[in-house]
Image: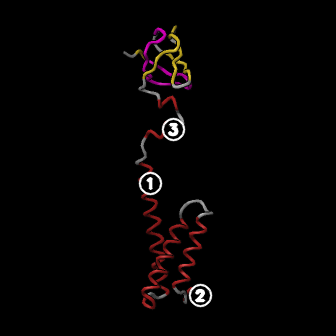
Amino acid sequence: MEFFSNAEYWHWMVFGLVLLILEMFAPGAILLWLGIAALIVGTLLLFLGELLTPEWQWIVFSVFSVVSIIAWRSFSKKRKLNEPEEDSSLNNRGKSLIGKTFTLATAIENGVGKAKVGDTYWRVTGPDTPQGGKVKVVGFEGATLKVEKSL
């Protein structure tokens, strides 16, 4: 316990650096904020010296730790809420094709045909349309695109 009451600025700096190093091996970002709080206390102790008693060092460390963790959590929640919806189609190629127009590689007969999308042929369903006709993707089901005639 005597160690904690006689801590000098460099003890806090080393403590902060150790926490930052441990952060690299631990999931989450809790140790990051604790390490930054310890570095702040070390810096304050360097400039304020004896004015920052051991009790105040721990109070400052606790306050900076809690406030920074709460601020970080609040920021990360807002960031998640503001992410664009396009990310939901990242691994869902059919969804990313909705609204696009393609040329039919084979005619849609009896409601089924094929359209070339990039270098891939997709199965399409929709109203009967001749080969070479333009269709617009209005939906998808698995690997099948639902289309309607386009002008």
* Rendering quarter of residue 15: bottom right
From the viewer's perspective, is 23 left or right of 57?
right
Q: Secondary structure at mark 2?
A: helix
Are the two marked residues, 1 and 2, in contact with CB atoms closer than 8 angstroms? no
Question: In front here: 15 or 115?
Answer: 115
Marks 1/2: CA distance?
38 Å
Q: Main secondary structure of the magenta part?
A: strand
Q: Secondary structure at mark 1?
A: helix
Question: Residue 28 at x, y = what percent?
Answer: 56, 60
Question: In front here: 36 or 5?
Answer: 36
Residue at which label 2 appears: 3
Residue at which label 3 appears: 90
In which quadrant will I find the C terminus?
top left
Marks 1/3: CA distance?
21 Å
Question: Residue 137 at x, y = what percent?
Answer: 45, 22
Are the two marked residues, 1 and 3, in contact with CB atoms closer than 8 angstroms? no
The structure residue drawn at horizontal position 56% and vertical position 69%, both measured from the top left corner, is 20
- Dot in front, 1 or 3: 3
Q: Is residue 72 above or below residue 146?
A: below
The magenta segment is 129-147
The structure residue drawn at horizontal position 52% and vertical position 31%, both measured from the top left corner, is 93
Looking at the picture, which amino acid does disc 3 mark? Leu
- As drawn, the label of residue 77 is 1
Looking at the picture, which amino acid does disc 1 mark? Lys
Is residue 141 within the magenta segment? yes
* Rendering quarter of residue 5: bottom right
Q: How has the structure been colored for display? A: secondary structure
Q: Is residue 142 above or below residue 29?
A: above
Looking at the picture, which amino acid does disc 2 mark? Phe
Sequence order check: which comes first, mark 1 or mark 3?
A: 1
